[in-house]
Image (cartoon, rainbow, N blue to C red):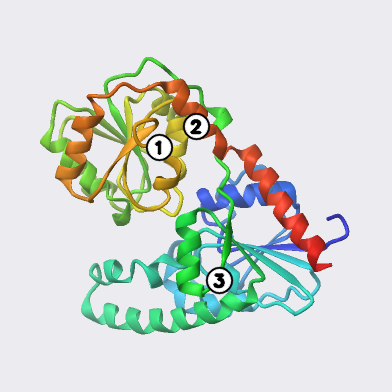
Amino acid sequence: MTSVKTAIVHDWLMGVGGAEKVLEEMLTLFPSPVFTLYHNQKTHFPDPIAQAEVHASFLQNLPLANKLYRNYLPLYPRAIESFDLAAYDLILSSSHAVAKGVQKNPDQLHICYCHTPMRYIWDLEEQYLTTVNPLKAFLAKLIFKKLRAWDSATASRVDYFIANSKFIAERIRRVYGKEATVIYPPVATHLFTPERHKDDFYLSLSRLVPYKRIDLIIDAFNQTPHRRLKIVGSGPLLHALKQKAGPNIELLGFQSDETVRTLFARAKGFIFAAVEDFGIAPVEAQAAGTPVIAYGRGGALETVVPGKTGLFFSEQKRQDLLAALEFFETRSWDSEIIASHAAQFSTARFRKEFSTFINTRVGDFS
């Protein structure tokens, strides 16, 4: 790979989430310049990202870009296509929005690690439209329709798709008509220590946004005040959820990595109510030896083993979650077995699979 000139394209660098953890490993394996729509230099990124040569698009210079960057969504296709990558042999994109739509020449190889096709234009449109006024909903429908056409057409610019789960591989097949190889994202399982002796509380960790369904979890625990719940995370719903939560529920906001690892290890169970593309948090819980109670859709179906490392509830309804909690509390759970299962999603495994895939495709293309 030393003779192959590589560029990495990432949607935006505004904070540190699951996509940025993948980018961190991409840069560790293939140090390269990064091209991105936005780069918030006030964010504390891990060293591989912080030390990278980052090129932001013209969107970076628009008014209030750091706060209102999502409002410029109609300009995303134009911005990602504005990058001139003609000098590079290999393009690696890390895409959950528009990064995979970057322009390329026939003599360039483009491999996309796809976290998901754009959720808000393909799967969450109706959910979004119900939260805005009629005029904004009308305009959003027009924008989303145009973006879907662009997103579908630019799938042909990708030579190989990598999906972060079988769930997303199927979505790629449905939306883009393309096959994808599944390489699960890296989870730092080695940083967690299984704890056999659990405290009497449940844990949820999430960005506090609507589709994560923290409201559902709070509803269930409000109805059973003898159960304690701790919620870690911040987001636009923090104040509203605090108002909703009963005295048996603590919303802790943002917490340090060390505190989070301790909470994962001490919790009796981890609650996960969202439909996620993969879901790193349930794997981290299992790495700490904590069983998971998850909604039975999305990536969780690929990381939780029913009866062994956790269980599922079938509908995003309070009564379904309560029934799962009742059943959960009749079972005994082995923290060592749970942690051993989580190890298959390790960072080391990702590095091996990702580097092998890239090097093989580059060799075939050369």
CA distance for labels 2 and 3: 30 Å
| Secondary structure type for disc 2 | helix
- Residue 145 appears in the rendering: yes
Q: Tell me: 106 left or right of 98.
A: right
In the current view of this chain or complex, which residue is farthest to the right?
3
Marks 1/3 in contact by CB < 8 Å: the verdict is no
- Residue 51 appears in the rendering: no
Q: Tell me: 356 left or right of 38.
A: right
Marks 1/2 in contact by CB < 8 Å: the verdict is yes
Which residue is at 49% across, 32% downward? 341
Query: How many numbered marks appear?
Result: 3
Task: Name the residue nearer the viewer: 137 or 298.
Answer: 298
Disc 3 residue type? Lys
Say which residue label 2 marks: 341
Mark 2 closeness class: few <14, some 14–19, many ≥20 residues within 10 Å: some
Which residue is at 55% across, 32% downward? 343
In the current view of this chain or complex, which residue is farthest to the top?
197
CA distance for labels 1 and 2: 9 Å
Mark 3 closeness class: few <14, some 14–19, many ≥20 residues within 10 Å: some
Which residue is at 67% across, 50% downward? 354
CA distance for labels 1 and 3: 29 Å
Q: Tell me: 280 left or right of 31.
A: left
| Secondary structure type for disc 1 | loop
| Secondary structure type for disc 3 | loop
Say which residue label 1 marks: 305
Task: Give how far across and how far down residue 311 sits, in percent.
Answer: 32, 37
